[in-house]
Each structure stands twice: as structure tokens, then as C-alpha cells.
Amino acid sequence: MSRRLWPERVRPVPRLRRGDRVAIVAPSSGLAPVFPGVYRRGLDALRSLGLEPVEYPTTSMKSDELYESVDARARDLKHALRDEAVRAVISVIGGYESIRLYRHLSPSDFTRRPVLLMGGSDATTYLLYARRAGLVGFYGPSVMAGLSQMDDLPSEYRRHLESFLFEPWSEFEYASYPSYTHGYTGWNAKDGGGVQKLHPAADGWTVLQGDAPAEGHLWGGCIEVVEFLKGTPYWPPASFFDGAVLFFETSEEKPPPERVGYMLRNYGIAGILERASALLMGRPKDYTAADVAKLHRTITAIVASEFGRPDLPVITNVDIGHTDPKLIVPIGARVRVDPLLKRITLLESPFTDR
């Protein structure tokens, strides 16, 4: 494997400014023309943040057409990354097979002109491709899932987006949102609908184990999508996971707790859990209280009992992924996890000043 791939440190990207142009691409599903109200609300949310969305051709294509047009999706993504007129690239929404783009991509597509690349769910694939090339990728909201609902979510969400993306900082402390929603409603409504009922976040994140702070580089995404990479040439070498802070979250497909356990067990067998410095799990979408309790028992049994890591800090119900509001997670950045204080802090900025 080339030494240029999976470097220890990632290259930061230029910080966004109000008025910047943002490329909108559809590397996964073609839902913008199916639910135009939701899509338009997402574009309006970007404008309300002071950004100017620039729609690329794939945003007008439906999913069946996109599925047959891998080259068009890859072309849009590559052109957006190279476009001197834009400062960020954000996906329309997730999907399930953007890994097919890998054969059309090269590391230089991401490193030639570093820009903010952000999305969630199926975006895990190309965000991890960017990390493989040595560039930070941002696991966070997409246009239709996260940004479109911004005005219906707690005000702390807008504040998080603005402070994270626009304000200079050297360390950034994450905070649990006061409430959350499991999903969206009214996507067929003319105005795009909104979010389902907001639930109080009670005590916020849940600490399953660990009594000492740990530091490391962030790596992960949607746990089901990461499975697509295992056994391929795009999987990191074992040494890459030394000191890694793994973060995973589950999709709207709601994998049962035991299935999540199967996936985590694989990390244990591969020796990754023994190399990692911490594990963060996103709030599982649509799980019942019984499901959550079972998931927690499963995680603890695998990490602590089966693979002998009762010392590994494990925090669950983190506002990551298929939950709203969500946090932006810079893949590759260094982070400190303090289970006793229930604190997660980015130790370095993924941005450079312009």
C-alpha cells in the first residue's frame, strides 16, 4: 500500500465564509425531484446560513436514473471538488450504493484542491475515501436530511452549525442537544413538511464504561455502510487503528441490536478494538427503550467481556448520524473523550484560515 494512503495526519480545509458558493451533488439517491419541497427547504437553509448553493446536474436526476449513471455521479463529485468557484461540497441525501463510485475516483480528486466535503449515511463511503487520501471529511447533515429541517429543530442546532463552520476555534467542545426527533413528516407536502415530535434528551449521552480520558483520531460513519468496505483494497491497515476513536451510528433500516453486535464483534476479531482508544455510538433511530437497553448490553458484553476492554471509554446516544439535530464530525481530526465528565472535545481545528 502506498505510503501516501491513510496518512497519520489529515490536511485541513479552508474555513467557510458568508457568501461562499456550495456545490450540491447527488452521489447516492435521487430524491430531490421526488420531494422538491424538502429539497428546496434545504437549499433555503443554506442560504439562511449565508451560503450560496450551486446545483450540479445529478440533483435533477431520480434514483433509478442515478443508479444507472455511476459515471455521472462520480463526474459531478469530481468536478465539484475541482470547481474554483465553490468552497464546499454537500450531498443531497444518503442512499445505499455510492461505494460504486470508488472505481471512478482517485486520491488526487480530493487532495488537489481541499474543500469542505459533507454528508451523512451513504456519504460514509466517499468521506472515508477522502480520509484515505489524507483529507478531513465531515460527517454531518445533508441538504434533505438535517439542513431542510433546521428551522424546526432546537435553536442550539443552528448555533452549532454557525459556530462550527464559520467561527475560528482551536478546540471545540461538543454538547448534547436538549431534544431530538426520530424522523421527518410530510415529505409530500408542498412546503416540504417538518420533523416528527421532539423528545427531551433527558440526561444526554450515556456512558457505558470507562473511567479515564482518552485521545485519538476520529474514524467511522454509518456502521452498515462501513461494512461495504471490509475486505476491499480500501480498508485501512491494522496499524491505522492505533489510538483511533471509533464512531458509529445506525441507519433508518434499524438493524437489531444483535446485528450491531455482529458488526462490532468483527472489529474485535480484527484486533481493532484492542487498538482503539474510545468508541462513540450515535443515537439509534427508531429504537424502543427495550431495544436501546439491549444494544447497550450487547456493546458492553462484546467490548468488555469478549475482547477484554472494560477500560475502553464507550459513550452512546451521541447526536451523530440518523438523528436530528446532529453534530458535525470531522473524520481524521483528533478528539478527547472524557467518560467521567461526559465530555467530547475536538483538540484541533479541521480548518485553515483564508
Image (cartoon, rainbow, N blue to C red):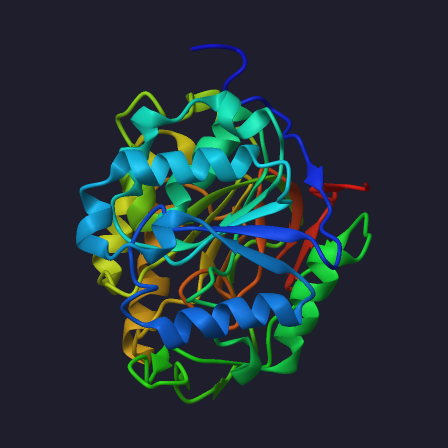
Left or right: 224, with 341 as reference point: left
State the image coordinates of residue 247 (x, y, percent, origin top left): 48, 49
Residue 239 lies, in percent from the top left, at: 49, 21
Q: Is residue 76 above or below residue 289?
A: above
In the displayed structure, would residue 44 be above or below residue 84? Answer: below
Q: Is residue 109 left or right of residue 168?
A: left
In the foreground, 104 or 232: 104
Locate the N terminus by quadrant.
top left
Q: Position of residue 114 (x, y in %)?
A: 62, 33
Within the image, what quadrant is residue 265 found in? Answer: top left
Q: In the image, residue 210 lies at what x, y percent?
A: 56, 53
On the question of residue 275 being in view, the answer is no
In front: 316, or 142? 142
Residue 146 vertical placement versus 152 (above, below): above
Name the quarter where the C terminus is drawn: top right
77 on left or right of 242: left
